[in-house]
Image: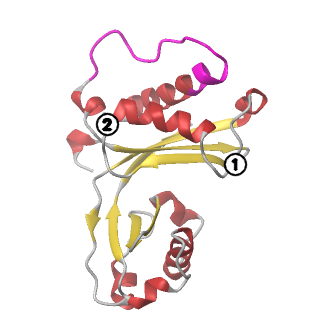
Amino acid sequence: MGDKDSFDEKEGAFLLDVARKTIENELFNKNQRILPDHDLPGKFIKKRGTFVTLTKNGNLRGCIGHIVPHEPLIESLKNNAIAAAFKDPRFPPLQRDEWKDVEIEVSILTDPKPLSYSDAQDLLQKLRPGVDGVIIQKGYHSATFLPQVWEQLPDKETFLSHLCMKAGLPADAWKDGDLAVFTYQVQAFEE
């Protein structure tokens, strides 16, 4: 991520606060001020892909995001915070009694870039565990894993197999060499 587009720790804490207050406002019918009175620097309103991940006692509780930027970062962050808390189809909507156990992570994405490769072995060599988020596409099937997923699936073959299954493809579909593959990087902040 370029220096002008990256965020420092203070800015990351602000993004986490925006996500937390957005969810609290919805969960507890609050009307907290989320954004400051002054104008935000341009990088906060630039269109960026974002993800918001919720964990409860260390376990995934919701994760929703947009890879392709289609709205200003702050709006994307707020919308994905609400979606992660209340609209992730893998989980029931977040309940008030769970809130004290929930931690938030926000991820700011670079624009995805195509990864050209000649065959399965070349694909394995070009992947950068812990650095690249990966998108695969084949026909109507598509899925992504954020770079943070490498922590749970550090083996490249296992990572790709799980990603294929997430896309609704056979686990070994990546070996055929006919997937469209894109990579992106993430700057993540967590509570």
Asked where in the image residue 29 lies, by quadrant, the reply is top right
Q: Which residue is mark 2?
A: 71
Residue 25, horizontal then vertical, whole percent: 58, 19
Kindly state the secondary structure of the residue where label 2 is placed.
Answer: loop
Which residue is painted at 25% across and 41% down in the image?
5
Above or below 93: residue 133: below
Q: Is residue 38 above or below residue 105?
A: above
User: Magenta residues?
Assistant: 23-40
- Please state which of residues 172 and 151 is positioned toward the viewer in this rendering: 172
Residue 58 - label = 1
Residue 69 located left or right of residue 98: left
Instruction: Name the one closer to the observer, 89 or 76.
Output: 89
The picture places residue 130, in percent across and down from the top left corner, at 45, 64
Label 2–label 1 contact, CB within 8 A: no
Q: Quarter-wise, where is residue 120 in the image?
A: bottom left
Left or right position of 74 against 40: right
